[in-house]
Image: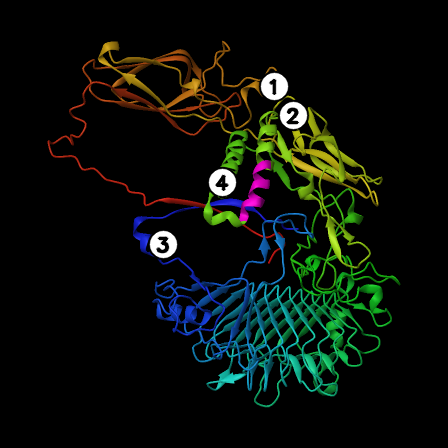
Amino acid sequence: MKQYKKGLLCLMVLSAMSLMAADSKPIYVTTFDDEAGENSSHCSLREAIIAAQKNTSFGGCSAGRTGLGQTDVIELQAGAYLLTRGELSPESSVRILGKSRNNYEAKSAFTDAYPAYEEIKTVIASKNADSRLFNTAATRADVQLQDIALKNGYAKDYGGAVYAGGNFSIKRGAVTDSKAGKAGGAIYAVALDANKEINISSSRIENNAAPKGSVLAMSCLGNMKDNKPVISIAQSSIIRNGAPDSLSAMDFCGSIDAVLEANTIAENTADADEGSILRAVSDGIERLSPYSSLTFSSNTIVDNAAYSAFYYDSNAVKSLSYNVLAYNGAGKSCRYLNNQEPDDAVPIRAFNNALELENESCILPAKALADAADSYKNLDVSNIAMYSLLTGLQNASVYNQYLPLYYPKAGTQGASLVNVGTSACSKYDQRGIARIADAALILSPDQRNSCDIGSVELLKFSAADSDTLNNPSQKKMLSDLQGVIDGFKADITDPDRQEYKTANQADLQAAELYLDKLKNNLIYRAIYIDPFVLALPQEVNVGSSEERKYKLLNAENYDVAVKAIGIGTELKVDSAGKPVLKGDAADLVCRWDSALNKILMYRTGGGATSLGQLAYCQYTLKEKAGSRAESSGILKGEFQNIAPIAVNDQYALSPENSLTVRANPLENDSDGGDGPASQLPAGKALWHKNEDGKDIPIHFDSIPAGLDFKAQYSGPCPNGYEQDTCYGGTLEFAAKNNFSQFSYEVKYTVFDSEGKSSASADINLLNTAKDTNSSSSGGGSAGIFGILALAGLACFRMRKYAPQR
């Protein structure tokens, strides 16, 4: 599962952009009343839309973003905005945000992590169910909605809630209880002259109705050519829409590009004699272009009541994959035009679907079914009861992201929707959970998670094999973690980020505790691995219900066992399932550190791995209670030599010491990327040495011509630089001219004991004598100086909710 991430985003803003920064403020709506300019004390939603279009204040609303072509952001509060003055008609691009559904004061019952994801808190509705909510048919303005429910829309013709002439999107929202007199009970799309997008994601579409397209309809032709709608509906629940006299729930036409992915489409209704839930046919002037594309992937389309669940003709290229397209009552789940037998020339691909084929409830071209062979073969569920494969429709709850859906079951009668053995399903399931259908498990291949058929994935607990891991720069690792801690502290005191205070305080406490423990557990060139990040969690039922949640992967619920396999070039598994390495155990250590809750991989000798070699460890997670499930995986690692660190040094040259200075730049330099010097393995040198065993890691990249120097130790540099001389011990620099008034800059690098070079650093020798020629350009003219101005550095924290949305 993709966890929500916490990070720091820093923006450097140049002075030329200051006006843009002033334009970045959203328009805050402060009243639920449907005002239109008569009250300057409050800002209504309608006034905010007008202010956005005019780029000036209106009513009680600020001007918003006044830059040319910018999308205005309008922020709403929790509550119901009831329209009494008719539909809203934005004339410029707007993004309207409801009260966030993320509650950072509480953990999610589903993920056991911050934030809790809650029900929709903001509603836009027609007060008397007598007007459409949004209409951009004439203005063609783009509208984006997030965390908002649209409710009780009505149009006597098209688009009960939304009549979209521009791009329209709704994310983490809902469209419910809306009606249209002709078409598009929820949404009607017009895509004249150019592609226009309708994007619905993580939303609930429920109880909408129209004679045609109770959920979605569109104009087919305009200006003597096909319209070009681009439709994307993903991770949404489309339920209980339509009526017994509706022609369709979703009606596709024009030169359409439509993708339906990971949705539940259930309990919708259309005419029992001619109606369809998904209708994709040409009908007179309402033409479906042959150049159209329809892609239905990983949907659960069941329990609908209509003549056809999917009604299609020879137009449009169609792809059906990983759908449960069955159990749709008396009507057929797939029906070709006029109930005919489809020709093999009909452009359709169908693989890894659950279909009722034997009883002819789904009619597809014979060639399409034959082409889906072997592991891509469609599952015939004609003689399998639905309850053997799926739970009942679960009501909206915290466990399903408030999206009614069906959970897959392991299956009976030798058939199952779970783990069909392929990996081309949707990347995320309807809940936003990563399916992870391609993880490597060489020790436990039978535990591998593959695609499930339908909108929801039943993950299989497993300890996955890692990609190749590397030891990090420990100095940078500590610095980065301290930066995260500083970011938490800044956020906690930031008055504009108090929404995240509780979550940040919990994260700060955990981060500070971890940093303290890490500083005391640094191992030279160690790789630190969180095994629970690699593993897939186990799903468990919530009480006695059919709802599901994850059993949290952590050391409280699972024991961790680790053992070293060795270092070599090739790892195989024998017939008994044990790893066999082409190599040897060498000095590899793999162990579980209970203080850090990490697996540590390192070598007692501290050496880097050779080219082509990998270090291998086996780890096992075992459930402490419950089913006592366990799974093992392989960790692969490369130990690399992190470059040493040379830092700039500064010394004074003065006439009192004859412009001579002694220096030891190694006092500030280190090999801290590999680990602290105190953790250097016994017998391992820190710096490059000469034949006498003296440290000579310093290589001068450039020395000014006016400077002499001598070193306490010297000798050839390491491999690749043997022709150069390296130095160590005390260095002495002296100006060749005792009357010099110039300062000098010496550039150098250092080599560690394995010949790895640092980045270049400077030794700055500052002459304290008055430098009267410092601004001279050699010809007596005045020097020219450039002034660099930084406008500012703004850093702020960003969070993302766990499931992908």
Circles 1 and 2: CB atoms closer than 8 Å: yes
Residue 798 appearing in the image: no
Circles 3 and 1: CB atoms closer than 8 Å: no
Disc with the residue nearer the chain's start (2 vs 4)? 4
Query: What x and y, as percent, mark residue 421?
Result: 76, 57
Q: What amino acid is found at the position of numbered circle 3 in the picture?
A: Ala
Whether residue 666 sits left or right of residue 805 in the image: it is left
Number of disc labels: 4
Query: Is 298 located above or below residue 304 in the figure?
Result: above
Q: What amino acid is found at the position of numbered circle 2 in the picture?
A: Arg
Residue 487, label in figure: 4
Query: What x and y, as percent, mark residue 663?
Result: 36, 15
Q: Which residues are magenta?
A: 500-509
Circles 3 and 4: CB atoms closer than 8 Å: no
**Regarding mark 2 in the picture, which secondary structure is present there?**
strand
Residue in the image at 77% along x and 81% along y: 331
User: Residue reaching furthest right?
Assistant: 413
Residue 364 appearing in the image: yes
Query: What x and y, as percent, mark residue 538?
Result: 76, 49
Given residues 127 and 120, the one toward you in this image is: 127
> Are there few (<14), some (14-19), or many (20+) residues within 10 Å of tag 4?
many
List the residue tagged with mark 3: 21
Dominant secondary structure (helix, strand or loop) of the stretch shown in magenta: helix
Residue in the image at 54% along x and 82% along y: 219
List the residue tagged with mark 1: 681
Disc with the residue nearer the chain's start (3 vs 2)? 3
